[in-house]
Image (cartoon, helix red, strand yellow):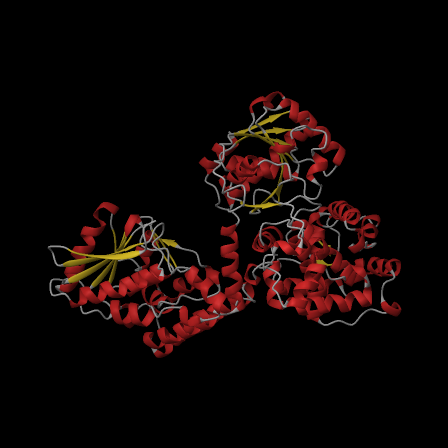
Amino acid sequence: MAKPHVALEVGYDGVAVISISNPPVNALALPVIAGLKEKFDEAARRDDVKAIVLTGKGGKFSGGFDINVFQKVHETGDASLMPDVSVELVVNTIEDCRKPVVATVEGLALGGGLELALGCHARIAAPKTQLGLPELTLGVIPGFGGTQRLPRLAGLSKAIEMMLSSKPITSEEGKTLGLVDSLVPSQELLNVSRQWALDIADRRKPWIRTLHRTDKIGSLSEAREVLKAARQQAKRTAPNLPQHHACLDVIEEGLVHGGYSGVLKEAKVFKDLVLSDTAKGLVHVFFAQRATSKVPNVTDIGLKPRHIKKVAVIGGGLMGSGIATALIVGNIYVVLKEVNSDYLLKGTKTIEANIRSLVTRGKLTQDKANEALSLLKGVLDYSEFKDVDMVIEAVIESVPLKQTIFSEIEKACPPYCILATNTSTIDLNLVGEKTTSQDRIIGAHFFSPAHVMPLLEIVRSNKTSAQAILDLMAVGKQIKKVPVVVGNCTGFAVNRTFFPYTQSAHFLVNLGVDIFRIDRLIGSFGLPMGPFQLQDLAGYGVAVAVAKEFGSAFPDRTFRSPLVDLLIKNGRNGKNNGKGYYLYEKGSQPKPDPSVLPIIEESRRIANIMPNGKPINVTDQEIVEMILFPVVNEACRVLDEGVVVRASDLDISSVLGMSFPSYRGGIVFWGDLVGPKHIYSSLKKWSQAYGDFYKPSRYLEERAAKGILLSVPASSSTGSKSRL
């Protein structure tokens, strides 16, 4: 692969064209930044150069700073690895250049790429170019002057919105805002930019240093009002994210003390934020997602994925209809099978409603929606299964039913057809026990709602073929899911890791802790809702079925709470019938239901685990830890048994499948930040006080004793029982 480099070419017109080349998106890697400095210095020195044009090779300007550098900073703890781009390159070399510089922007100019363009004296863009500053999604702020120049070009309100939302705009909107000076078709882009640069040099067009502009900002009192409103919104929508407030502080510095002062503060704050836990967590999640596409003995043995054109989905309930929706939106033909015409009609109507909601939310055009629905066919028997490439079974969690279906589809489908199950907990070997096609049996575990949630857990048994895994990974990517390959066990990786989550919450309630306090604290930690509101949402039938599976698989460390059975006995079923731990009334937010309190008291009496019959006294931090440390503990067992390829697979799965906050880096990463020693000693203390539910795993004990991080791969000498 060609090395990243920067080229300089001087034309007969006296315009030096400096071009960035680092496919696929011309990321600003360290050699590119050094090359830009060198070529700009050369162009500034040369007598045959009147003006400069900055562009990117391959139809893209630049996708921004090379994130690999962040990773190196986090590994070493050395922020000095970050180059001084803002002052040395963008201010001193580009903006203060004695020759005019015009940015030729095409394809995308994101992050540091857009910031380079903002430092130029004009910007000429091709239509439909993406312009944005998404740095806050990585826990930092724009660091090459973007916090100062974007408000001066696009206006304060729009600039704040672009930075805090991290959403790009098109060059068309950029032209309206004044961010882009001219919109030009791609084929004319370079010629127009060269002429524009010469026009600036000859004073036919204005020579504008963006950092010195104030005309778009308004008065200081108006600006402070805009900033105040933005701070209030950030407090509401991003309470645990320091980069939002830091970004607003830096913008304000430039408004009060001038652009250059703002640039200096931005550089300092950027370096502080790079080393924050938030940036470490978000950068880790970014790389964790990329790593999922590498699976040893699957993606590295020369196999090519087969094209999956037609998929049968068995069961049109909530999961089946969601899976079918995801497939047809991903341009895959679907045969939906149900047991009778009423169920089939209901399933089809659910799919149509799913598609309508995607259109309403702007995720799909009406044309694409019509196209998707034309790829769906409902059936009541197996006659359409003779040429399907894959079947996904999505019926209720019943072993005998699944076994019957698998023995039927093995006969009805072609011999190359992949036989997948969407079970969330049942062992694959049980599902396929009555078939002879063990190599084609695979788990395709979607998360509800299946057409919205981004994770696809691909479960392999020790007999599943590499080809079947590769094919399902390709389908996952086609339908815009993140496929994570995991080993086979009860609950697989995600549900297995998180089964103690709800049980811990129930344990605490039966120890006398207030339900609504638990939900509030878990919400403050960063999950979208607490465990009890989540249970209300899923319905209690799921809770009962799942508890049963885990209770029989891991009887030594499960807690059987009487509470759900009592709620069902009292005619409650959560959101489904409007009454659970919370009251659900149409058009209003869920409200804590005081009438649930006597039922909770009854549960505490039956469970009888309160020390001396009195509620325990715990701090807010202890509540969060007593709920999440057992989850980390189970994650340790999952790692020890080799259920996942790497610890980061469990991190990305916890973020995408369980909505664990991405800025905390995922469940194992967060465990490492908190520290294995602290987690181990806390669990040890609680297990002595309350029993085996909190008993630390052998893996956690070893890591805590040796001072090794949980995420460090186990050496083969530790005797891990790999399921992959």
Residue extending farthest bottom = 257
- For image coordinates 32% across by 50% down, the residue present is 2
Image position of 355 with respect to 205: above or below: above
Q: Is residue 505 left or right of residue 37?
A: right
Image position of 408 with respect to 474: above or below: above
- For image coordinates 77% across by 58% down, the residue present is 506
Residue extending farthest top = 383
- For image coordinates 30% across by 55% down, the residue present is 175
The image shows residue 565 at horizontal and vertical percentages of 82, 50
User: In which quadrant is the C terminus drawn?
Assistant: top right
Q: Is residue 3 left or right of residue 354?
A: left
The image shows residue 279 at horizontal and vertical percentages of 50, 65
Q: Is residue 521 left or right of residue 73?
A: right
Residue extending farthest front = 717
Q: Quadrant of residue 255?
A: bottom left
Q: Is residue 162 left or right of residue 99?
A: right
Q: Nearer the viewer, residue 583 or 675?
A: 675
Whether residue 529 is visible, yes or no, is yes
Q: Nearer the viewer, residue 541 or 635?
A: 635
- For image coordinates 78% across by 72% down, the residue present is 617
Q: Nearer the viewer, residue 183 or 686?
A: 686
The image shows residue 588 at horizontal and vertical percentages of 65, 55
Q: Quadrant of residue 343?
A: top right
The image shows residue 674 at horizontal and vertical percentages of 62, 68
Whether residue 339 is visible, yes or no, is no
Image position of 567 with respect to 395: above or below: below
| Number of marks present in the image shown | 0
